[in-house]
Image (cartoon, coloured by chain):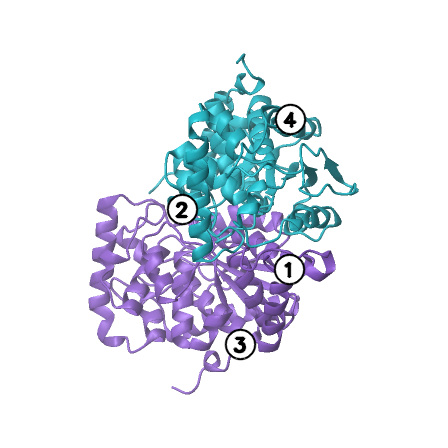
Chain colours: A cyan, B purple
Amino acid sequence: MSLQWWQGPCQPLDHVARGKAETRQQQLTKPAGSLGRLESLAIHLAALQGRERPSLDKLSIAIFAGDHGVVAEGISAYPQAVTGQMLANFVTGGAAISVLARQLDAALEVIDLGTAEPLPPLPGVRHLQVGAGTQNFARDPAMTLAQAMICLEAGRDCIQRARASGCDLFVGGEMGIGNTTAAAALACWLLSCPASELAGPGTGLDGAGVAHKARVIDAALALHRAQIDGPLQALIHLGGFEIAALTGAYLAAAQQGVAVLVDGFICSVAALLAVRLNPGCRDWLLFAHHGAEPGHVRVLQALEAEPLLELGLRLGEGSGAALAVPLLRLACALHGQMATFAEAAVAERPS
Amino acid sequence: MSLQWWQGPCQPLDHVARGKAETRQQQLTKPAGSLGRLESLAIHLAALQGRERPSLDKLSIAIFAGDHGVVAEGISAYPQAVTGQMLANFVTGGAAISVLARQLDAALEVIDLGTAEPLPPLPGVRHLQVGAGTQNFARDPAMTLAQAMICLEAGRDCIQRARASGCDLFVGGEMGIGNTTAAAALACWLLSCPASELAGPGTGLDGAGVAHKARVIDAALALHRAQIDGPLQALIHLGGFEIAALTGAYLAAAQQGVAVLVDGFICSVAALLAVRLNPGCRDWLLFAHHGAEPGHVRVLQALEAEPLLELGLRLGEGSGAALAVPLLRLACALHGQMATFAEAAVAERPS
């Protein structure tokens, strides 16, 4: 296969801006290191944004939604119709991410990549309808190569729109009944581990439900393994439309120089897939939280990610990332607005 | 001794409001429990505020500052003059908490309880000058009973002002070179453990400095132990003016029905002291973060506290609590503004 768009180079970090930010941190009126993780975050954002004092005023959130054929195997606690119902809830303002977007003054895009039952047009939703949900990967590949390419490009297009609007930080979210099963299957392939280590309750399976989900995933891995020669084929055989779009968005963000805040388990699997497709994108990915889904910690470890929050979240929709945005903004405000020892005439040196 | 003001009853929680908030949480358009800690926080705030949908619009921050005679023992990395210099930095807007107060639209009070060198009046600072710092508790009791009472009342007065202004949430902060030594000594007495388990680097001691600090604390505990018959005497012998004021503020907040968000190690020691003086205040105390000071985790355990953040913070000034405020506000916004399953016509029951 010829070179794909996502294999192109990612934006380099600005080491001059990073150096200036490091120097500034040392001059602020506080004991060195006393703001902990917020100091290194501000310095990293300076390197990403190419300015001594970064800012995250302009936040773009995009929710990618799609249905999953594997729901036919009885792996979700909720009916598949909820995917479409929640798309309406996102744009009418009643969903968690809708509330968070308002509170954070963020732009919110909602992208329908394909529900099992096609929806009537919803004002405010971009309906791409790549397919009537994915195929049941317990029997067939989840999607075609063409569908995967459309979804990856949908993520890229979203980043282009965000960047055109002056976006300082991108948050991707997902909605899709059954998508923890697809994400766990992908993670099993990417991390070479059995489903028992990564399958979790998702929206609310009991112990027997989780065991069944793990059996479905292990059987699918056995079915498809011979056809999977790399991360793109893993995505095609085991993934979901929204996972593919998130992967494309993360890759495009790194190529276009937009910092990303990654949400929970499903987004982290998309991030791991993105890093496998183009390792240069890793620097552009910040991680928001340790979620409650048991596979999340393993995926974060593989990414060498140290998320900011651990609150037992397992909602998705980008909600965990949105909740971490104020911390990043406050890290930037402290970095940019605190007085230096010289400005405040405070004794700098230990006695 | 006759009954003291802080021994009076704390405001009871509103169980009707709590019940309504619990019911509301179950009806919101998300899998039950998927917002993790934020759900129980919103419900607890409903019980504290006596309304189904709590809010934290009006935030009051007060910084209590005082010097410590024990600095003569060489237990701090910074010169004592920094306490006064930072008081000026707080009100001119260059300190971390000044930046955070602006970003959070909070009222910021700065209260000088007594610096070693009395300061010229600083516009915006309340100068109480209870003493020229505490006495060196390596030799003498840190303060008199009368000084302790004035400081406890200074905290109470601060809460009365906050409440009069309609405060929804109170954050106390502290500044005082040497105050991790006083806080560690108090914690050693309250938890009956040696200083080696609770003394830490504070603003930046090295290993030898921490060992010296622990020896100073152990010697002081040996010196004063026979005179300490309870938490008030522990405060008098080992505490600090700002620690006493924080303790008074926490006690008064619980009595007057103002929710409190507790900052780091020193504030948590004041909170533990408050709980020992009046156990009923515990319900009103929320805890913001696990700080980097090693004694903090032990104090939090004794309080059965589960802080929201763990970011390696060790600045004080109330900064760690301020950083957690957006999470509490977002928890309230989600609780109050998300649609219910019925409102959004989303399928509620698992399939």
Q: Which residue is mark 3?
A: B255
Task: Farthest residue to the bottom: give it.
Answer: B2
Please determine if labels 4 and 3 lie on a single subunit.
no
Location of residue A109 with respect to B24 vertically, above or below = above
Which is more N-terminal, label 2 or label 3? Answer: 3
Q: Percent from the top left, x then y, of residue A22?
A: 45, 30
Q: Percent from the top left, x then y, of residue B11?
A: 55, 78
Q: Amino acid at mark 4?
A: Ile
Disc 3, SS: helix
Q: Nearer the viewer, mark 3 or mark 1?
A: 1
Q: Amino acid at mark 1?
A: Glu
Q: Chain of mark 3?
A: B
Q: Percent from the top left, x then y, of residue A106?
A: 68, 41
In the image, is A347 to the left or to the right of A334? Answer: left
In this view, the residue in front, B328 or A185, is A185
Please tell me the numbered disc located at residue A150: 4
Location of residue B38 with respect to A25 vertically, above or below = below
Please tell me the numbered disc located at residue B312: 2
Which is more N-terminal, label 1 or label 3? Answer: 3
CA distance separating discs 1 and 2? 40 Å
Image quadrant where one finds the N terminus of chain B = bottom left
Disc 4, SS: helix
